[in-house]
Amino acid sequence: MKHQQDGRARGPQGAHGGQGNRGSARQSAKPPATPDVCDASEDRLLSGSLRVLPPVFQNYGGAEVMSGPIVTMKVFEDNAMVRQMLETPGEGRVLVVDGGGSDRCALVGGNLAQLAERNGWAGVLVHGCVRDVAEMIDCQVGIWAIATHPRRSLRAGQGHTDLVLDIAGVIVRPGEWCLADADGVLISDRPIS
């Protein structure tokens, strides 16, 4: 387990090591744990209406659970559209960003995590990298990504929204539901509660 400069433990279980409040401050009801959802939904897992992302994502944000309807975006090493989206009211949604799995720069950093928190997003899932972990850990939003990288991305404004994405081999559609916790990330064709 890694330690932040302020002494807090940091690892794939999130800012609080899997302990404490599991829900976002914005959510009135605590979502179920991902293992419980999987155990109760074998038929949905087999049919594909409930899907599990590969275990390559970890949480870098302060919220230990991220749950909400999905907004999709596809960009590559350019986060201008990510900022534009996070400047809009989040209304408890989860922004899923297909960054192509790039490990050459970060698509989300501390400023964008603060923007997501301020505007009511449940969180951001990045198929790519993030940075400014010491800042993101203080934001009560989920920020799931594959790794960290200190370099910022381009800001040219290239990309697309509201697409069906292929995230690490799993199909993710706009309007579907994302539930993420220390045990994994689920994508569902209906709300999970």
Image: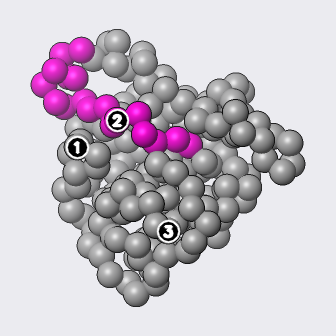
Label 2 neighbour load within 10 Å: few <14, some 14-19, many 20+: few
Label 3 neighbour load within 10 Å: few <14, some 14-19, many 20+: many
Residue 113 picture location, percent across and down? 60, 61
Measure how far apart labels 2 and 1 are at the Cα level: 8 Å
Q: Which residues are magenta?
A: 42-59
Contact flag, marks 2 and 1 (Cβ < 8 Å): yes
Q: Quadrant of the C terminus?
A: top left
| Residue that protrudes farthest toward the bottom in the picture | 156
Q: Is residue 91 visible?
A: no
Contact flag, marks 2 and 3 (Cβ < 8 Å): no
Residue 79 picture location, percent across and down? 45, 74
Relative depth, front residue between 31 and 38? 38
Residue 58 picture location, percent across and down? 52, 41
User: What amino acid type is highlighted by mark number 3?
Assistant: Cys
Q: Secondary structure at mark 1?
A: loop
Mark identifier at residue 186: none
Question: What residue did someone put label 1 on?
Answer: 169
Judge whether residue 51 is colored magenta. yes
Mark identifier at residue 54: 2
Q: Secondary structure at mark 2?
A: loop
Residue 107 picture location, percent across and down? 48, 67
User: Quadrant of the rendered structure where residue 192 is?
Assistant: top left
